[in-house]
Amino acid sequence: MAFSTALLLRLICICFLLSLSSALDATVSYNFVVSYITASPLGVPQQVIAINDKFPGPTINVTTNNNVVVNVRNKLDENLLIHWSGIQQRRSSWQDGVLGTNCPIPPKWNWTYQFQVKDQIGSFFYFPSLNFQRAAGGFGGFIINNRPIIPIPFDTPHRDIVIFIGDWYTRNHPDLRKDLDAGKDLGMPNGVLINGKGPYKYNDTLVPDGIDYETIEVQPGKTYRLHVHNVGISTSLNFRIQSHNLLLVETEGSYTVQQNYTSLDIHVGQSYSFLLSTDQNASTDYYIVASARFVNESRWQRVTGVAILHYTNSKGKAAGPLPDSPDDQFDKTFSMNQARSIRWNVSASGARPNPQGSFRYGSINVTDVYLIRNKPPEKIKGKHRATLNGISYVNPSTPIRLADRYKLKGIYKLDFPTKPITGPPRTETSVINGTFRGFMEIILQNNDTKMHTYHLSGYAFFVVGMDYGEWSDNSRGTYNKWDGIARTTTQVYPGAWTAILVSLDNVGVWNLRTENLDSWYLGQETYVRVVNPEKTNKTELPVPDNALFCGTLSKLQKPQDISSAPSYMNGNSRKLFLTWLVFVSGLFFIFQ
């Protein structure tokens, strides 16, 4: 009997060790040196933010459940935070890289981000979140691949190609900030970049000499996966490739119903991936175009971004007019109908073995409703500010999550209104009080004259409806309750609304903001605070060992020791791991 007990306990120990080793998923490490370089993407020398001397920065390429370690050295002359847009850091808003959760990395300092891409797949990007820095660069791609055990819903592409599109100013980002602070509009951008480069000279009048342009080389008869990101400031762009269809397969972590598009509107902060079949005869190269939408086309023609798709057997250079953009001057619903056509592939497997469609969001009871309305910037106490529900957000000197952890009072208010306030606008640190494991409906009402996109950190939400006019209770009758796309960033058309549903199962403090940098800079954001009321730490990771302290907690900040090696597991994790090792070793010793 003793022998049987000993054998049983040995087997239990072995199983535990195997499960523990599988829980310790692979770690992928990167070193980022963030610095200024001088570049001339539009022919004018200017200050650009580079990572490892590259603009755009390197692409992070990982697999579902990998642990990601990114050591960041700040060589700028101002504070820095890197935000991982769309990466749902489960139980760890400490790593999100926005001021509501993180103290900034001071100049000349190192800081190491450590997080797990838990149960995620898809196309994302990272960028600097402070001080309008994204307008100067500092962005790069982030690809999360399926684990080998989970098939992708299409044949494996020949290669991944990352493409960044975005509007660009030749003024440096501190000057753009000064314009906004002075109440000035930024005006029309100087151009649209594709992968950090200016337009191919398709027109002698519109494009000057000496501008470097992007060339993407492909082999004939192959299929490529294009990961396309709008990393610009405030301009929606139409993306297209001459004589080629774009087969949409995924957006921001969700596989889509596969549909061909000749072009697609990609709004600020949004990411898509397409399959591109190189099935043309390569008589010439082909134009890749990113042109402004919802603007006066004749004035904006000179800012069009143009790159080249070059077949290895191409017989000549691209020539002639660019492929036409959608003509919806008299049909405002074209772009919206295109957006509505993007639906969730409920039969595809995602990051988990269970089909994505098993989460039947349409039958879940809503616990909280927020109608959030934006307005054009206005003067509040003499300063130019932008608002959501009449409140212009002010970042506190101590991040919200740290204030919670150290039980500080008066840092913020849990009083963000559920609908627009009737009184005069005000500036406050006003935060949404989210219900843990609640199901929130958010209606984004755009009362501005320009397009806006909105992003929620820490979550993918379901885009269930959009239309022109004012939202009302009756609008719920138009919601898509079956296969609305799950994503992290959605557009809201001028004079229109977009409704999203989100399951608040990720503890932390998560940023809800407009992706339009000018309005974001002027205060058009808030945070959703999600706290587990139970006294347990199982739903959120502890404060990381290398946490930075600022504001009221500045006295806790130790001088930096940049020689210390980054480690994925924090102190508590290591203690738990070692304790279990000692326990298991003791059991083996006892029953030998």
Image (cartoon, grey):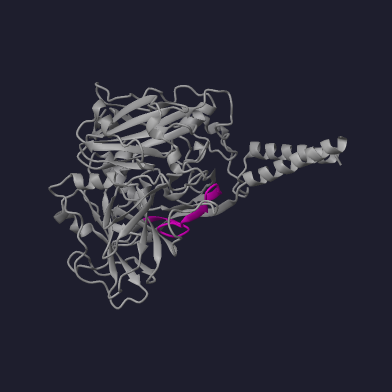
**Of the pair 259 and 389, the residue shown nearer to us:** 259
Looking at the image, the residue that sits furthest to the bottom is: 315
- The reply to whether residue 395 is visible in this rendering is no
Q: Nearer the viewer, residue 385 or 282?
A: 282
Against 41, is 8 above or below? Answer: above
Q: Quadrant of the C terminus?
A: top right
Does 56 lie within the magenta span?
Answer: yes
Q: Is residue 503 visible?
A: yes
The answer to which of 460 and 561 lies nearer the viewer is 460
Work out whether 288 lies above or below 466: below
Query: As drawn, which residue projects farthest toward the left?
Result: 330
Measuring from the top left, give residue 111's x and y in whole percent. Answer: 54, 46
Q: In which image quadrant can residue 12 be found?
A: top right
Q: Is residue 409 magenta?
A: no
Report the front residue among 92 and 384: 92
Q: Which residues are magenta?
A: 48-71
For image coordinates 60% across by 51% down, the residue present is 26
Q: Quadrant of residue 495?
A: top left
Q: What percent of the width, then of the height, locates residue 453? A: 30, 42
Q: Quadrant of the N terminus?
A: top right
On screen, residue 261 versus residue 122, left or right, reads left
Q: Is residue 313 left or right of residue 592?
A: left
- Give residue 350's position: percent from left, percent from top: 47, 47
Q: Is residue 89 left or right of residue 288?
A: right
* Residue at the (73%, 37%) spot, across then down: 579
Q: In x, y percent, where is residue 508?
A: 48, 32
Labels in figure, total:
0
